[in-house]
Image (cartoon, grey):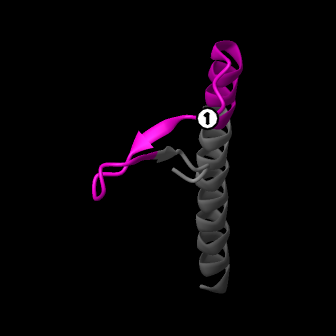
């Protein structure tokens, strides 16, 4: 029984690490694409509209 629990914990941990790796890779690829597009257009940053105030601001890295 202990072996089964150990195997399940290892499988779950491997799955969780894989999902985290894929998520981080997607974020890094998007950030790279955005930086490349900004470099090509000469932009300093990307503006997004705040729905609450209606004002524009620079897009943050976590968005």
Picture residue at 60% right of the left edge, 76% below the top: 4
Seen as rendered, the residue at the extreme top is 40
* Residue at disc 1, secondary structure: loop
Give residue 10's position: percent from left, percent from top. Answer: 67, 68
Please say if 27 is above or below 2. above
Neighbours of disc 1 within 10 Å: few (<14), some (14-19), many (20+): some
Q: Which residues are magenta?
A: 31-56
Name the foreground residue: 49 vs 32. 49
Give residue 25's position: percent from left, percent from top. Answer: 67, 41
Q: Quadrant of residue 13?
A: bottom right
Name the foreground residue: 57 vs 25. 57
Give residue 1's position: percent from left, percent from top. Answer: 59, 85
Picture residue at 67% right of the left edge, 49% below the top: 21
Q: Which residue lies under the disc numbered 1? A: 45
Seen as rendered, the residue at the extreme bottom is 2
Magenta stretch contains residue 44: yes
Picture residue at 71% right of the left edge, 20% below the top: 39
Magenta stretch contains residue 29: no
Q: Quadrant of residue 49?
A: top left
Q: Quadrant of residue 15?
A: bottom right
Please say if 16 is above or below 47. below
Q: Is residue 39 left or right of residue 19?
A: right
The number of callouts visible is 1
Give residue 2's position: percent from left, percent from top. Answer: 65, 86
């Amino acid at each position: 029984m202990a072996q089964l629990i150990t195997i399940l914990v290892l499988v779950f941990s491997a799955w969780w690490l894989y999902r985290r790796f894929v998520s981080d890779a997607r974020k890094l690829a998007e950030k790279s694409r955005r930086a490349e597009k900004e470099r090509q257009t000469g932009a300093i940053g990307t503006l997004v509209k705040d729905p609450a105030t209606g004002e524009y601001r620079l897009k943050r890295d976590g968005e």
